[in-house]
Image (cartoon, grey):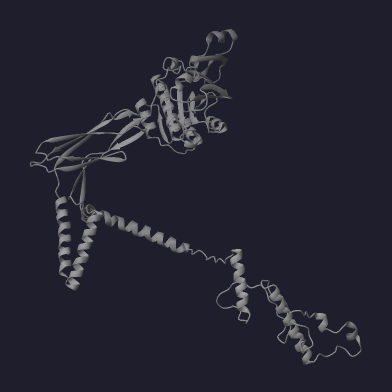
Amino acid sequence: MSDPTGLPDEAESTVRRSDLTPPPAARGGGGGPRPVDADERTSARSSRRGGADAKERQQPKAPRTARRKGPRGPRISLPRLRTTGPGRDDRPDAPRARTATRGRTRADGNTRTITLPRVQVPSALTDTGARILVLTGSRIRPIAEQTRPVWHPVVEVLRWVSALGWTVLAVGLVAWWLTSRFAWAELGMVAAACLVLVLACVLLALDRAKVRIRADVEPARVTVGDPATGRVAVTNGSKRGMLPLLVELPVGETAARFTLPALASGRTHEELFVVPTHRRGVVPVGPATTVHGDPLGLVRRTVEWTERTELYVHPRTISLDSLGAGLLRDLEGEVTPDLSMSDLAFHALREYQPGDDRRYVHWRSSAKHGRLLVRQFLDTRRSHLAVVVDTTPEVYTADEDGVELGISCAASLAVRSILDEQDTTVVCHGETASRTTAPLTLDSLSRAQVGDLDLYASVGEASALAPDASIAVLVTGVDRPFIQVQRTLDQFEPEVVKVALVVDPEVPVGVRRLGSIVILHVRELTDLRRVLFSGALT
């Protein structure tokens, strides 16, 4: 059945702009544009609206971009974003458009993100706060020092109470307040019990035993792996008997605890302990303290009786043959290319100049040539060994174990050089020892820490401590680039023998030379004797 308006069905009709506009020939006819009556204008709007609805049914997810003319003027429909609050579309077809938009958002996985600005505190406010803290600190500190005899004993007593003690005290105070407010008799008993218990524990900790404690460690210096034992002797110095007492002695990262029996007046009790020496380093021992308190642990008061001592655990060393120099060889010194006017190594004769010492005039040659000639010498120097250890774990194959092996090699070289009565300088991660004894040199190596360091600065420090060095040894790992080794060792004088001792468990043991640097490869500490047997340091 046909539409009464004479138009095709809405599902099959498409109204074009040309159908609603007269053809050019019709417009060009001398009467001007033909007026359109109200019925035709209404039919055109219905046809356009029907065509748009048909397209939406065919493609429901496509954005609406059709234009529509009417009394309100042209209107363009753009793809809509998900919005909330004011500005939402209130058209009748808005719910369908929002539903389609939400479906597309879920399918694409795109969500709207909101970035909040970072809150920044004004610099003037922070500077003012820091200035106030400085002023108040500078003013409060003198007052605190003057009133220290008043508040310091109170603070020390408050430190006696443990966390459990503060908890029991808080429970007692809260129970006391509830009892006074609600007249609860049971809570009053709890409050009284807690407060009396804390007071009794404080009174028990006030007892000060008169004892003398002595802590010794023998020997004071050991090598890695050697046994080291300590002794703690406690003497009762009071005129009455002493109850059992707990003595604590920190040893390295742990603490030794001894429960002393009851001692009569003047009696002494001794306890032995073992100090771990499986790692190189400095083990602090002490101070020995006595612990006064209660069995429940509410109050704990400690009193120090001894000073802190240190046990040096030296790195492993190996006995080496003589390095080929020493006191006997250094009587005449090592000859250098530097010219000098007063030394032992005669070089040549030159013409006398004003200011020269007349003692060095060679009279026989002067009489023969008819003019004054003086002796000229070559400067000489004593043998001086400078050793630098690279403590960066990343350049060694075995990480920290490789660093420990490098420190052991450096210690062996230093001890051998000192036994040869040579001057010796050792630099290891900020620890230095120059022209000193073997025990003090090993003490410095015991204090050295393992970690990253500026190798160039360390070698520069060694060259400053030993400007007259004759041999410079750099102990490093196989992963250290050779260009860095060469650059750091070039800080020494050109006449210095430069040696790079490379520690690597995978490279064959041997000696080779690259330019002016002698490279020694060792796998373990015993290989050091083999590579030095070739005379690489002479």
Q: Where is residue 65 in the image (x, y as percent from the top left)?
A: 71, 75
Q: Where is residue 12 in the image (x, y as percent from the top left)?
A: 76, 79
Residue sitting nearer the eye, 248 or 418: 248
Choose top left, top right, bottom left or bottom right for residue 447.
top left
Q: In this view, does 358 lie to the left or right of 220?
A: right
The structure residue drawn at horizontal position 59% and vertical position 10%, both measured from the top left corner, is: 370
> Farthest left residue?
240
> Farthest front residue?
1
| Labels in figure, total | 0
Choose top left, top right, bottom left or bottom right for residue 441.
top left
Q: Where is residue 532 in the image (x, y as percent from the top left)?
A: 47, 19
Say which quadrant the N terminus sits in. bottom right
Q: Position of residue 241 (x, y in %)?
A: 9, 41
Choose top left, top right, bottom left or bottom right for residue 421.
top left
Mark yes or no: residue 181 visible.
yes
The relative height of residue 25 versus residue 107 in the rendered view (above or below) is below
Mark yes or no: residue 68 visible.
no
The structure residue drawn at horizontal position 20% and vertical position 66%, both measured from the top left corner, is: 175
Q: Is residue 29 left or right of residue 53?
A: right
Residue sitting nearer the eye, 154 or 124: 154
Residue sitting nearer the eye, 51 or 332: 51
The relative height of residue 406 versus residue 331 in the rendered view (above or below) is below
Q: Is residue 96 left or right of residue 137?
A: right
The structure residue drawn at horizontal position 45% and vertical position 23%, both measured from the top left corner, is: 384
